[in-house]
Amino acid sequence: MIPQKQYGHIIVLAAVLLVSCQKAPDASQGSGSGAYQAQAQAAERTEAEVTADTVLWVQLQKDLDSSKLKTGDHFSGEIAEDVLVGGKPVIPKGSVVRGRVTNSTTAQARGSAGLLSLVLDSVEVHGRTYDVTTKPVTLQGAPLQHTMPNQPANKIATDVKSAYAPKNGILQFFLAGPVRVRT
């Protein structure tokens, strides 16, 4: 026979064992922690709008030369300066951008110049790719020149037939429309 005092201890011990053996509730089962998880997910899904006419400074990953590229060719680069919205970086430095050539010509005649027009198509931020539309950036080479008949042969000017942007060069693109980026 168990004394009356020990019944109380046995009941408390049984309750502790029962509670310790129970599985913690899953957040998907609608418990109070589910509301906290939903708030955390909503915070993760906040977006910032990068407005039209925002400058994207892009550092090129390779040389771009109008004598070697044709319309439709692709190029890539990296964001050279953080893009800020409300003082916070939304598109961080180092984000990869991809673009394409919209016009490429080399100088053909005296006085003409090589042209290279570029636009950006996308930017990758924290593993997500966002479509962007930018205003074209047009590079122009120096006009093609020839030696004047009365100049000595060793004074021949170098002909520049193409537009050129060097690897690691930085170009300035302006957004043509807004972009919503998940922060």
Image (cartoon, rainbow, N blue to C red):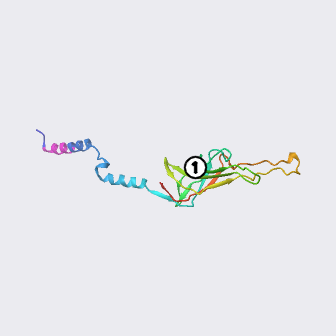
Residue 139 position within the rendered picture, expressed as x and y whole percent measured from the top left: 67, 53
Residue 161 position within the rendered picture, expressed as x and y whole percent measured from the top left: 73, 48
> Which residue is situated farthest in the left direction here?
1
Residue shown at 18% from the left, 42% from the top: 10
Q: Which residues are magenta?
A: 4-12
Residue 142 position within the rendered picture, expressed as x and y whole percent measured from the top left: 74, 53
Tell me the quarter of the image containing the N terminus.
top left
Q: In the displayed structure, does residue 54 sit left or right of residue 105?
A: left
> Which residue is situated farthest in the top direction here?
1
Residue shown at 17% from the left, 45% from the top: 8
Q: Is 25 contained in the magenta span? A: no
Residue shown at 46% from the left, 57% from the top: 47
> Which residue is situated farthest in the front direction here?
109
Residue 21 position within the rendered picture, expressed as x and y whole percent measured from the top left: 25, 41
Asked where in the image residue 63 lies, by quadrant, the reply is top right
Decide which of 24, 129 is in the foreground and name it: 129
Q: Name the residue tied to disc 1.
A: 99
